């Protein structure tokens, strides 16, 4: 409780207090009420960052689950070297996101990297492309990096849910003639509803709070099209030194995260009542 109060409750309260002030880095802060929140509504850069963050969150969450779920099904069954497979898949998780971003900046480098020359050697491109200079290729590179970095963590969560399913149920369904897809659709997915919801909330929250990969790999470019909400808060707070407005943006982001989590939990509850 002490840790939660000191490192969460007090900072949130103080951030809320800052959001009601014109709070420069140097000088005296001045009470302005809700003006920072009114300013937010007319901030086209914030709306653009919010739109990009939502787009990124949807794409990367789908990509992570599309990779993590098959991997969880693969390593769930006891087979030879399964522990080695689990370890190899999970290894990128222990690398810091900033470190992973720097690693992929090097991999995507047009001169000294690995990806661009490999694409050229395979005959997929005529000349080595600068992957981080174009929005589409840079966005795809970031998605691949995040999936490589995060999929192992999501796999472990899903693996826990798979291992919690009683083997008796699976065997009974198999004896009754249920095929692999039928067992997955009518047995595995319903019993893993809570596990999937947990993994989904973690993935969505982490994606909305994305910052490191955009700051390190593209610096928000090309043409400032990769400015996430947290990146915009960073620019307002520590580049423009509008700490009060940055605090208001942070409170707004907190409210968005809470609302999204509530919606996800409500959908989970409704799904359980129907089943």
Image (cartoon, rainbow, N blue to C red):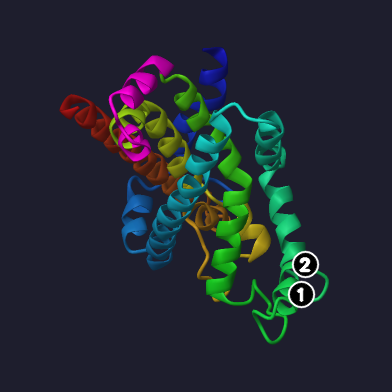
Q: Is 33 situated left or right of 230 in this image?
A: left
x and y percentages locating residue 118 in the rendered image: 74, 71
What residue sits 30% from the left and 31% below the top? 178
Image disc number at residue 136: none
Q: Tell me the quarter of the image containing the C terminus.
A: top left
* Pick the front one: 209 or 10: 209
Residue 198 colored magenta?
Answer: no
Contact between marks 1 and 2 (CB within 8 A): the answer is: yes
Check disc 1 and report the residue beneath it.
Answer: 117
Mark 2, residue position: 114
Is 88 rendered above or below residue 231?
above
> Is residue 245 or residue 70 the one in the foreground?
70
* Identity of the residue drawn at 65% across and 40% down: 89
* Part of the protein shown in magenta: 166-184
Within-10-Å neighbours for mark 2: few <14, some 14–19, many 20+: some
Residue at disc 2, secondary structure: loop
Where is residue 7 drawn, in percent x and y? 56, 25
206 or 219, nearer to the observer = 206
Q: In the visual, does 219 lie left or right of 258?
A: right
Element type at marker 1? helix
């Amino acid at each position: 409780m002490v840790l939660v109060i000191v490192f969460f409750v007090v900072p949130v309260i103080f951030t809320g207090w800052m959001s009601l002030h014109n709070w420069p880095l140097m000088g005296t802060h001045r009470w302005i009420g809700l003006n920072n929140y009114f300013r937010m509504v007319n901030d086209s850069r914030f709306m653009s960052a919010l739109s990009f963050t939502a787009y990124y969150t949807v794409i990367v969450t789908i990509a992570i689950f599309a990779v993590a779920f098959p991997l969880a099904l693969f390593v769930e069954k006891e087979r030879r070297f399964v522990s080695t497979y689990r370890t190899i898949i999970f290894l990128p998780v222990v690398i810091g996101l900033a470190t992973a971003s720097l690693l992929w900046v090097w991999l995507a480098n047009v001169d000294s990297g690995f990806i661009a020359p490999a694409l050229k050697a395979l005959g997929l491109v005529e000349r080595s492309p600068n992957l981080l200079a174009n929005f589409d290729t840079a966005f795809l590179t970031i998605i691949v990096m995040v999936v490589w970095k995060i999929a192992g963590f999501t796999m472990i969560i899903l693996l826990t849910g798979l291992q919690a399913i009683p083997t008796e149920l699976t065997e009974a369904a198999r004896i009754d003639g249920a095929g692999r897809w039928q067992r997955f659709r009518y047995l595995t997915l319903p019993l893993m509803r809570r596990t999937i919801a947990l993994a989904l909330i973690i993935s969505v929250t982490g994606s909305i709070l994305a910052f490191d990969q955009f700051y390190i790999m593209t610096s928000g470019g090309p043409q400032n099209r990769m400015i996430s909400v947290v990146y915009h808060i960073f620019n307002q707070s520590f580049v423009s030194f509008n700490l009060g407005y940055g605090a208001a943006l942070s409170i707004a982001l907190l409210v968005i995260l809470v609302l999204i989590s509530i919606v996800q939990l409500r959908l989970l509850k409704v799904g359980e009542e129907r089943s």
